[in-house]
Image (cartoon, coloured by chain):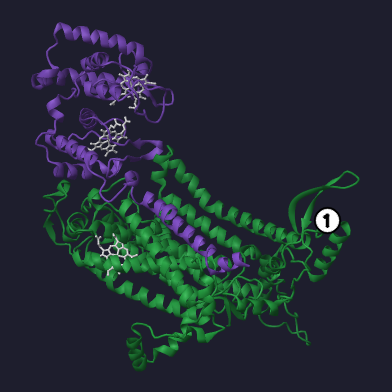
Amino acid sequence: MSAPTTTSGSTSAVAPAASVPKRPMKGAGAVTWLDERLGLGGLAKKQLRKVFPDHWSFMLGEIALWSFVILLLTGVFLSLWFKPSMAEVEYMGSYAELRGLHMSEAYATSLDLSFDVRGGLLMRQMHHWAANLFLASMTIHMLRVFFTGAFRKPRELNWIIGLALLQLGIVEGFAGYSLPDDLLSGTGLRIAEGIMRSVPVVGSYISFFAFGGEFPGDDIIPRLYVVHVLLLPGLLLGLIAAHMLLLVYHKHTQWPGPGRTNNNVVGFPLMPVYMAKAGGFFFIVFGVTALMGALLQINPIWMYGPYNPSQVTAGSQPDWYMGWLDGGLRLMLPWESELFGYTISWNVMIPGLGLMGLLFGVLGAYPFIERWITGDKREHHLLERPRNQPTRTGFGAAGVTAYGLLWIAGGNDVIATQFSLSINTVIVFMRFAVIIGPVLAFIIARRWALSLQRHDRELVLHGYETGVIVRSPEGSYSEIHAPIDPSRAYSLTTHERRVPLEVSASADANGVAAPGRGKERIRARLSRFWYADEVPKPTTAEIEEAAHHAQHNGHGADGLDGRERHVGIETGGFVGGDDWSSSESDSSSSSAKR
Amino acid sequence: MKKLSTHRRHPLAGLVVVLLGLVVAGSLYAAVRPAAADGSSSSDTDLIAEGRELFVVGCASCHGLNAEGIEMQSGSNNGPSLIGVGAAAVDFQVETGRMPMARPDVQAPRKEGMYSDEEIAALAAYVASLAPGPAIPAPEEYSTEGASVARGGEFFRTNCTACHNFAGAGGALAEGRYAPPLKGVSPEHIVEAIVTGPQQMPVFSWLEPQDRKDIIAYLERLEEQPAYGGSPLGSLGPVTEGLWGWLGGIGSLVLASVWIGNNGVRAGKKKQQ
Ligand code: HEM
């Protein structure tokens, strides 16, 4: 990473010849042999020169990818010893605290993995930590995509695929958590069974179907095993492949900046720059997972003991990604009603099924809702800074807050003991917080975004505060503001000037009301709400005016930045754009057409 | 008569009934009572008298002059009646520093004890003299010789983990009460807690002496056990694991991303310009 210029310069997409090896390499014979038979060379050449833009937040999804690879590797190791069977055996392994007890084979082999298979405990712990990291990284990756508007056309489908990955990941994690058949596994399954049973009318049938009879039965672990090692990993692999293919097809979005437009991609070629970066990053993710697996205990199944329906432990919690659902269950009011002789358990159904449906329903519909409200049907390849979409940012913040509060509520007992609070107080507080918190978060985040917009406007018009204080002959003090660098000014002004939608002409010439106007009016109102209080970005005239003003008053440019400003506004086009793209191609990075 | 019926619900009314019952039961009990707590010799009477004195000074303000308990107007106990709680309860409460309680609170916290062993023995003897109750366990009742750790683990998971957590790390109960962590609690106090059921904890009358020893053996093993697989993160279950996964795991990976992002090719190029 220290000397990238030479390597990337020579393989820049602008100079395609560079990526053809000049001297025969070792193993080239085999490659040629394969190429002549599979014809992949041409395809690969094209793909390997694909340009990717560079930003740290674009690597969050990569954490998810690499932790999935670690899950596959460690999971295969575990499956060599793990027996998904609920047959009763007597434990005779080396963990004396449980020796002689009767337990399921699944639990016994998990203990063997922990204590009698060399490296087994490390693999179990790495597998589990990787599962936690997999879901956490998918979550932050999704938040990045949301807050920067990367889900907009043409990427809606990939957004949906991403959501499916997250959902399947959650189910996969839950299935894994249930496999060892320890006390927590069983407690978790018991709750899952409760949620199944809360489905009106058919609940008990669903539960009997899933468990092959009365809970817990003998079937659930073998069934979950097939789901965990075959069905869901297969689906995940397929969806990940689709996700990556779409990514390559659409090409990555980029942050706006000089030379970067909606029609190009500025970045570095996949080979070798990105390959090296990504490969290196894999080892970092692997290293962090291995360190955690080696140093931090996770899921100490030997402490929980084998599942026994008559036992339960304080601190029974699911893994973090289910925690917010558990929180919903813990906060829900005890509502139940009787209907035609059936009990409807709202208290389980609403949080158990409703929350998950709500989260993924809202997230899945979001791109389409926003598109409808803003009426923006164009393709977007440039990202938006969260501040430039205050309403979206506000909704995002509200969602994160609601999720976070439910999540905290899932650990209410741990919070109560660790902070010496009454658990009842925590619950009552959380019930209110879950309703009020998101509203506050929306208002605060939106305001915040708007004031950042104002700040940007100030920066562009009046420059930045240099910290240099001057005293005028009259004795008054003022701080010198210096114009910001033109490329920065460009980046701060590339976003569009947005105007709320108007209701179209109310009636045609004959006075007949146009159909669908009610809908349009709602939309216009929503759109006004969406863009309300938007701080207009400065116009060219305003900037010129401000520059003049600065010169006349003597603050400003003199001696600090004498350069002429090149700021493209309105059109989003950079005044010196052509220069930029040519200078880009001289240097290390390259730019490609979309 | 009217007066009597209005005081039907007075705590002393219950006490009178209990005492009447005890008169009957006590004589029967005396025959089967363990030898150690039996036989009121003259030294015992001295001890009881000394205990009563200590009690009047340190405990009567809450538990009443005769340990009959004091009921507040609101109906809540300032201090409950100690008649029949036995020497084991006094020994447990005072040795673990819970009693005397510093101020009325939802739960008396464990703290540094205020009484010497002799004083505790005297207090215990006094309370035990009021009515029979569980005696202070003899050392052979909590020695773990020949105890089965695996069996103890089963008893522990079935009876205790619901409140005290799978690793004895403690847990929350309703209204600000909590089951305390069991780390470092002496075997004697474990037996006393099991037989007297302090506060929210039930009296585990169904646990045989051998079962109690097994539980103690299991708890001792948990403390000696090496931390298999690394730091147990407080043994609080998935909540702390999740916290570590986010703050430690994802936190460090995001930092790594930022680092790579800032030290990438582009940054290199910038520096050269
Ligand atoms: C997205 C992918 C995956 C996730 C989120 C995931 C998650 C989990 C979790 C949380 C556990 C409980 C681990 C424990 O603490 O013992 C588990 C267990 C297990 N997983 Fe996975 N897993 C994934 C993929 C796989 C794959 C691909 C395989 C095998 C090919 C696999 C095989 C196993 C086995 C055999 C166990 C039980 C072993 C034991 O509990 O000791 N997993 N998984």
Farthest residue toward the right? A474
Measured as percent of width and height from the top left, residue B110 is found at 34, 28
Q: Is residue A334 visible?
A: no
Q: Residues within 10 Å of mark 1 (few under 14, many from 20)?
A: some
Q: Is A435 on the left or on the right of A465, as rendered?
A: left
Residue A63, picture quadrant = bottom left
Indicate the amino acid at tag 1.
His
Residue A41, picture quadrant = bottom left
Measured as percent of width and height from the top left, residue A175 is found at 30, 64
Query: Which color was chain B given?
Result: purple
* Up-down relation of residue A92 to residue A391 (above or below): above
Which chain does the numbered disc 1 sit on?
A
Q: Nearer the viewer, residue A420 or A16?
A: A16
Q: Is B19 on the left or on the right of A290, as rendered?
A: left
Q: Residue at x 22, y 24 (%)?
A: B88
Q: Specify whether tag 1 is near ligand 1 (CB below 8 Å).
A: no
Query: Which color was chain A given?
Result: green
* Up-down relation of residue A415 to residue A384 (above or below): above
- For mark 1, give the secondary structure: loop
Farthest residue toward the front? A23
Residue B76, picture quadrant = top left
Measured as percent of width and height from the top left, residue A592 is found at 58, 82
Q: Which residue is mark 1?
A: A555
